[in-house]
Image: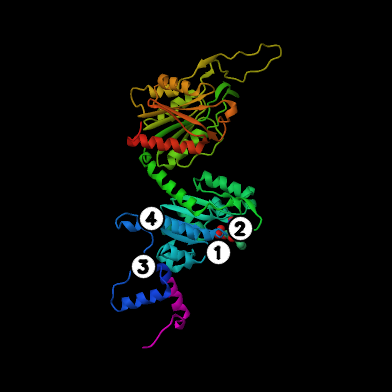
Amino acid sequence: MASLTVRQLDEALKQQLRLRAARNGRSMEDEIRSILREAAGETEAPPQAGPASRAETSATAVAPRLLLIVGGGIAAYKSLDLIRRLKELGYAVRCILTQAATQFVTPLAAGALVGGPVYTDLFNPDHEFDVGHIRLAREADLVVVAPATADLMAKMAQGHANDLATAVLLATTAKILLAPAMNPAMWANKATQRNLAQLKADGVTLVGPNAGEMAERGERGLGRMAEPLEIAAAVERLFKAENAVLPIKGKRILITAGPTHEPIDPVRYIANRSSGKQGYAIAAAAAEAGADVVLVSGPVNLPRPQNVDVVAVESARDMLAAVEKALPADVAIFAAAVADWRVANAGAQKIKKRPGAATPQLALAENPDILSTIAHRSDGRPPLVIGFAAETENVVANAKAKLARKGCDWILANDVSPSTGIMGGDSNTIHLVTAAGVDDWPPQSKEEAAAMLISRIAATLTGDRH
Ligand SMILES: Cc1cc2nc3c(=O)[nH]c(=O)nc-3n(C[C@H](O)[C@H](O)[C@H](O)COP(=O)(O)O)c2cc1C
């Protein structure tokens, strides 16, 4: 009987065989045996079974589709382990390697772990007719970039699309999770931090980077890629969060934010220190969860959140009018710091300082109470009315009293004493006061507090909580 060895095959055939074997998780010899068995009419032996996964255990269950983009960083080797972890969790994983990434890991190794082709080229005639960058972008429930290089982050922040990875990142409407990895000096660089701020504003989620030893000898600092298990946990969190807020989808949510400006005369006004950050973060989180969001905003210095209808107002009376016009709503969240009083005798002209003249006296008049007005409406009251209580003392006790007085359903109370740095700052410590009791939320960023509120609202809309 004639014998044939792999070595005797020509290079092109060997390469094809290598790829086929890698895809099926077999050695080249096993792949040849399988081909011969198929040719002889035997049923094909199944590829080696991996760990039981969500995708494999149920033929009918649809596995969440995850697109992993591997950037050209030294941490790319960890992404091979990440593929394994994600597959163990039952995700259907597709993988793109940037050209630089192919210097660190091979498409063959990534393909063997993914169990399918790995994509590297934007201009690949096979893929353009078969998968193509738009299909890769569309057929993903989540896109993970690990490692996210400084270069990839810069291109994303600028909206570049000159290779497969960036074209897909620009074309996708799926959530994006970035696991940055780079030298600490590159991470700390103002350009990277600028790009990071832009990406966060665009709604990208981050995991890491961590602090620690770098691959370069003697280098330490912030810039290590999060470990594969941490990234897999962040992926799970994102999917869970997405499901948790599903009941918000399509609901109309009305939010107020910022201070109000109460005119003294055409050039002067009374205001407060509200930055509007918490209300804007809630609007962004609600829009991200698929709500139809209208944000009635006092004067602030913040970018408009994406997919939010912003109505800009100045005074408390303007704000009430805009709120009433925006009804009906399923949920109303009053996060604005509305001035309690306005100047009763606001000048139509600029009040002039005249030598020897008496100092002008400002008489104050009470402003409409927007929260109470909406919460007490007999018709068109939103089913869930939520107020904020900015207190400087007896925070929870005052919030409980406010809940009863205003007729709203929930109060989010926070201590805005100057020492807390909450007013105008980036973090918040909230006590959620409802008829059922008080929930003390941990100190967290205003974005995290917003996400927590949206999840809580979603649970209420499904009837899980009240
Ligand atoms: C040995 C070596 C290691 C590198 N490691 C990193 C890294 O960890 N993070 C990073 O942002 N860039 C790193 N770079 C630079 C990137 O490879 C380079 O910016 C490349 O253009 C990134 O391409 P990509 O973003 O398309 O993957 C490294 C370069 C070399 C030569």
**Ligand 1 is found in which quarter of the picture?**
bottom right
Residue beneath disc 3: 47
Task: Give the residues in magenta.
Answer: 1-19
Q: Amino acid at mark 1?
A: Phe
Task: Tell me the distance, in whole angstroms, between the alpha carbons under discs 1 and 2.
Answer: 13 Å
Residue 4 belongs to magenta span: yes
| Image position, residue 250 (x, y; %) | 36, 40
Q: Residues within 10 Å of mark 1 (few under 14, many from 20)?
A: some
Which three-letter amino acid code belongs to the residue tagged 2? Ala
User: In which image quadrant can residue 99 be found?
Assistant: bottom right
Q: Which residue is denoted by mark 1 in the rendering?
A: 104
* 66 with respect to 186 (left or right): left
Q: Nearer the viewer, mark 1 or mark 2?
A: 2
The answer to whether the residue labelled 2 contacts the one labelled 4, judged by CB atoms less than 8 Å apart, is: no
Of labels 2 and 4, earlier in sequence is: 4
Q: Amino acid at mark 3?
A: Pro
Q: Earlier in the sequence, mark 3 or mark 2?
A: 3
Cβ(mark 2) to ligand 1 < 8 Å? yes
Q: In this rendering, would 408 be left or right of 183? A: left
- Indicate whether residue 48 is drawn in magenta: no
Q: Nearer the viewer, residue 370 or 110?
A: 110
